[in-house]
Image (spheres, rainbow, N blue to C red):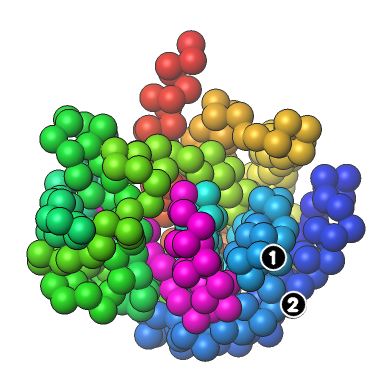
Amino acid sequence: MPYQTNDSLWSPEHQIFRQTVRHFLATEVEPNVDQWVEDHEIPRSFWLKAAEAGILGVDIPEAYGGPGGDFLHRLVIAEEIGYSVAGASMAPSLIADGTAEILYRSASEEQRQTYLPPMIRGEMLFGLAITEPDSGSDVSAIRTTARRDGDDYVISGSKTYISQASIADAFMVVARTGEEPGSKGLSMIIVEADRPGFKRGRALKKMGVNASNTGEISFDEVRVPVANLLGAEGRGMALCLGGVNMDRITWPLIAHAASQRAFEETVEFVKNRKAFGQTIFDFQNTQFKLAEIKTELAVGRAYLDEIIRDYQANGKLDTLKCAMAKMWLPEMEARIMDTCVQLHGGAGYMDEYPISRLYTAARLHRIFAGTAEIMRVIVARSL
């Protein structure tokens, strides 16, 4: 059963694109994801196929090789990958294609012409390197340095929890270029992975989402030309924050779609599983729990639809509403997933059942792209 959306939100073009994404996930991801989970990595051939399907760089203009779509096309991908059980094992990798949007928004014309076309053809993979061993949500605590030496930056430091760490061809690295405290001295610089002094560290093993590669990288006096600077010096935090609302609506959409899938899988399971002479569904406790889930899904969807309508009307995302969505929807998802596992009984703990992968993937959603605690700080500031 496909993910049920509010058709009034989407144009016919978006609906056609949704069918493309759905078909791609069914034919290219679902048959292969178990092997990717074992490998902790998605093969390069996947990205070439994704490019052929037209789902890379969907909001990049045609002048740079993109399909010329809009941000709503990215939201379609988010919904479909969230609803897909296979997507639960690899969503961050496909969502990491958002690096193309960051580059388009931040780069010079020469940088756009150099990097965007191969990215959109699936020939060049980028990673976003922000988090460090001693700095997560607090980006202002970044210690990686980029020292100016003539026409080069000399970069030293390390990053961790980096998506695509083992396979990316280049990284957008946030490093300290100035003496100013906090975030004021941060810049974003492109570092190609074949430069001397660049090293890939461990591929990290995770609780879930194991087809999505995550790892460590380090820089030992890595020289890159000043021309690799994105934007201006000291603008690193601004470039990170420029797309933050996009992330904060993308992951709540994924959380909602995954919750919907978990709900549907659970309804089917309890209607077929018997205990004490009746189905699990026949117990009033089961019906009450499912009624609560159905209601939460409806409330969450209504709020997401409001944010999308605002974007369609104004061309921008409301920071407060996105923070509230990022805070509440993944926590709603956590409640739903926990209940659905419980209603599956012992089967819910078995990875052969979809609910198991949906459950472990969901735990990441309260952390990824801004923790629930940081979202509470943002909402509290509006009071």
Residue 108 lies within the magenta run? yes
**Residue indicated by mark 1:** 62
Q: Quadrant of residue 76?
A: bottom right
Residue at image point 46% right, 54% down: 108
Q: Which mark is residue 23?
A: 2
Residue 289: x and y in percent read 64, 44
Residue at image point 69% right, 73% down: 54
Residue 149: x and y in percent read 12, 55
- Disc 1: CA contacts within 10 A as few (<14), some (14-19) or many (>=20): few
Residue at image point 40% right, 80% down: 41
* In this picture, residue 1 sits left or right of residue 363: right
Is there any visible trace of residue 366 in the rendered image?
yes
Residue 128: x and y in percent read 37, 59
Residue at image point 10% right, 66% down: 220
**Helix, strand or loop under label 2:** helix
Residue located farthest toward the top when viewing the structure as drawn: 383
Magenta region, residue range: 106-131
**Mark 2: which amino acid?**
His
Tell me how many marks there are. 2
Front in this rendered view, residue 308 or 338: 308
**Helix, strand or loop under label 1:** helix
* In this picture, residue 123 sits left or right of residue 163: right
Residue 242 lies, with reference to residue 203, above or below; the image says: above
